[in-house]
Image (cartoon, rainbow, N blue to C red):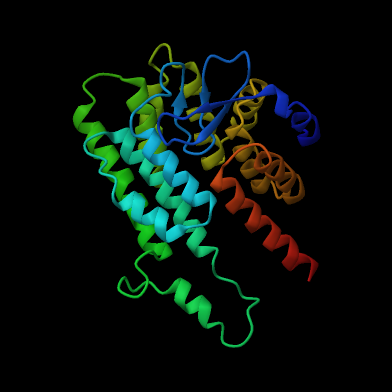
């Protein structure tokens, strides 16, 4: 898989922006595609799914995140009641995870002196720093567990949409054994080609499966932007950091994907340390 050839096929003119009905973010779909995966939360999107009521609430939070207002965004998220909707729990989890990364990124070891500012940013005492990175990350994981619990209670038959959300929740919790069992079920449900293909690719990349190259090729051929993130992860596993960084910079120029930015920073830190 030659990254330069793959990247040449991703031009801005080949994508149309749609509004994610799950997390309220801007998602991107190839002109001839009938569905897509959201670059922000990795939810499945299809026509008719873009108008859920709570996506507007999340859209307002996205604006606060874009402005770097972590405390305001966290306060707004804390005020949202996810109720008994597992998809809403899943969407909230993605946003808390993003805020946790932003708060963690406040830490800089280039500061002068004793770097007291870092101590304030990393302080996990709730009274002193209510929106510390660990609290936000814990809330993100809590919501994923809640989503899984609700789905297990609601899932009376093989519902592809709920199976997919449960699978992605297990992946984000690094519970690969449980994800594998869900993947088996997802592969037996008819009419969910993209969800199944994407889930198989994610599982292969996350677990270092031999099928990763084949699944990535299929999704890259249909111009699924989130698959670029997993291509970068796959390249990192092969120690091809320069190629992985190139892929992530391309993705960052087209879509809002916090995970991609986090991985790129890690790669750049390793490259900088190597140069030193």
Q: Quadrant of residue 186?
A: top left
Q: Quadrant of residue 222?
A: top right
Quadrant of image for the C terminus: bottom right
**Residue 76 makes an appearance in the image:** yes
Q: Quadrant of residue 148?
A: top left
Residue positioned 62% across, 75% down in the render: 109
Give 212 or 221, whichever is nearer the viewer. 221
Quadrant of image for the N terminus: top right
Residue positioned 38% across, 64% down in the render: 131
Left or right: where does residue 259 sit relative to residue 164? right
193 in relation to 101, above or below: above
Residue 68 x, y percent position in the rendering: 52, 56
Residue 123 x, y percent position in the rendering: 41, 74
77 in relation to 209, above or below: below
Residue positioned 21% across, 36% down in the render: 84
Give 270 or 45, whichever is nearer the viewer. 45
């Amino acid at each position: 898989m030659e990254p330069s050839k793959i990247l040449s096929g991703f031009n801005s003119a080949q994508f149309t922006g749609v509004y994610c009905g799950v997390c309220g973010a801007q998602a991107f779909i190839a002109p001839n595609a009938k569905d897509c995966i959201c670059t922000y939360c990795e939810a499945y999107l299809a026509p008719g799914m873009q108008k859920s009521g709570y996506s507007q609430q999340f859209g307002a939070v996205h604006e606060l995140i874009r402005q770097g207002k972590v405390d305001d965004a966290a306060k707004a998220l804390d005020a949202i009641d996810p109720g008994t909707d597992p998809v809403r729990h899943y969407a909230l989890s993605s946003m808390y995870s993003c805020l946790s990364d932003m708060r963690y990124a406040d830490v800089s070891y280039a500061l002068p002196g004793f770097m007291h500012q870092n101590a304030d940013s990393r302080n996990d005492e709730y009274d002193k720093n209510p929106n510390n990175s660990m609290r936000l990350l814990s809330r993100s994981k809590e919501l994923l567990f809640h989503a899984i619990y609700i789905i297990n209670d609601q899932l009376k038959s093989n519902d592809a949409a709920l199976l997919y959300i449960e699978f992605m929740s297990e992946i984000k919790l690094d519970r690969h054994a449980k994800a594998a069992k869900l993947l088996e079920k997802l592969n037996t449900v008819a009419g969910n080609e993209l969800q199944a293909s994407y889930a198989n690719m994610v599982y292969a990349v996350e677990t270092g499966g031999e099928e990763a190259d084949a699944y990535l090729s299929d999704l890259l051929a249909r111009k699924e932007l989130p698959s670029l993130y997993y291509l970068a992860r796959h390249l990192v596993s092969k120690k091809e950091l320069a190629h992985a960084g190139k892929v992530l910079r391309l993705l960052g120029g087209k879509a809002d994907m916090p995970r991609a930015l986090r991985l790129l920073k890690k790669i750049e830190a390793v490259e900088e340390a190597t140069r030193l």
